[in-house]
Amino acid sequence: MNIKGVLFDKDGTLIDFHATWMPAYRQAVVMVAREAGRPGIEDRLLAVAGYDAASDSCLPTSILASGTTPEIAALWSRETGMEESWLKKKLEQMFNSDAPAFATPVKDLHAVLGRLESRGMALGVATMDSRASAAATLSHLGIDGHFSFVCGYDSGHGQKPGRGMVDAFCAHEGLTAAEVVLVGDTPHDLDMGRAAGVGKVVGVLTGSSTAEQLEFRCDAIIPGIAQLETLLDRW
Ligand SMILES: [Mg+2]
């Protein structure tokens, strides 16, 4: 195979989803409960958005795992009666300023990206986070220089599992979809890759999904991106 580019999801793929986002979500529900004058509603807000307290994890297709900030704002607005547009703005402010500081990379992130680059790969990020928050996180981790393309739900290329983000990466890098590997941790990521007809779709287990939830949607499942080179050598 002639693979020339890798498009990564961010949360759960490049960064440890749980370690990065749960502190940010916990701060957010404290703010919502306070502003809504609804003390004690914090746990309920997390639960309706897909957080499972028993397993201390977010369900893979939930709004918290693979939704957007406007979707979270709409849901919590319905729960509390708060004004949706105000809440959306406030959450975006919080997530853009606070979440990058919590960003916890997956193992060997910097080294893996460097080696992929030295193989001549174009590297990109496609996330359902906002572009500004994604750029801030990559910069905070010191890995922004590895990526020639970063897009979020608000970049104008549509949302996952639609194919727009992959098409935009291909257009930006001058690649065909067949020359691209898509790497992600949720069904939405992998379905996006399939919809765009990428060369290979790879699932990773550093996010919110189990192997059983991903296996029918991808060509290979690996524990994390550190194993991606082994696959590239095989293909
Ligand atoms: Mg993800």
Image: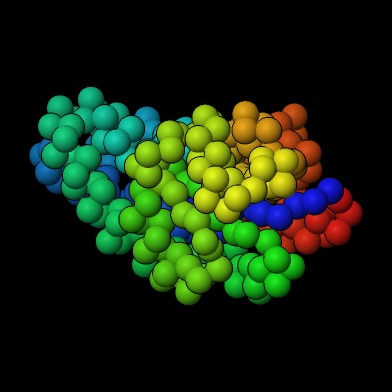
Up the image or down, 79 lies above or below 150; here it is above
Up the image or down, 201 lies above or below 141; here it is above
Q: Measuring 22% from the left and 40% from the top, which residue is drawn there?
A: 88
Which residue sits furthest front?
174
Q: Measuring 26% from the left and 30% from the top, which residue is drawn there?
A: 74
The percent position of residue 132, horizontal first and vertical second, equals 33, 56
Left or right: 43 in relation to 215: left
Q: Where is residue 200, by image quadrant?
A: top right
The percent position of residue 159, horizontal first and vertical second, equals 45, 34
The percent position of residue 112, horizontal first and vertical second, equals 68, 68
Q: In this view of the protein, which residue sits in the foreground, 177 or 230?
A: 177
Left or right: 140 in relation to 106: left
Q: Measuring 41% from the left and 46% from the top, which residue is drawn there?
A: 152
Q: Where is residue 154, by image quadrant?
A: top left
Q: Can residue 49 be seen?
A: yes
Q: In this view of the protein, which residue sits in the foreground, 37 or 110?
A: 110
**Colour scheme used in the picture?**
rainbow
Left or right: 166 in relation to 229: left
Q: Can residue 57 be seen?
A: no
Q: Measuring 50% from the left and 35% from the top, which residue is drawn there?
A: 164
Figure label count: 0
Q: In this view of the protein, which residue sits in the foreground, 197 or 190?
A: 197
Up the image or down, 49 lies above or below 106; here it is above
Left or right: 82 in relation to 99: left
The percent position of residue 117, horizontal first and vertical second, equals 66, 68
Q: In this view of the protein, which residue sits in the foreground, 135 or 120?
A: 120
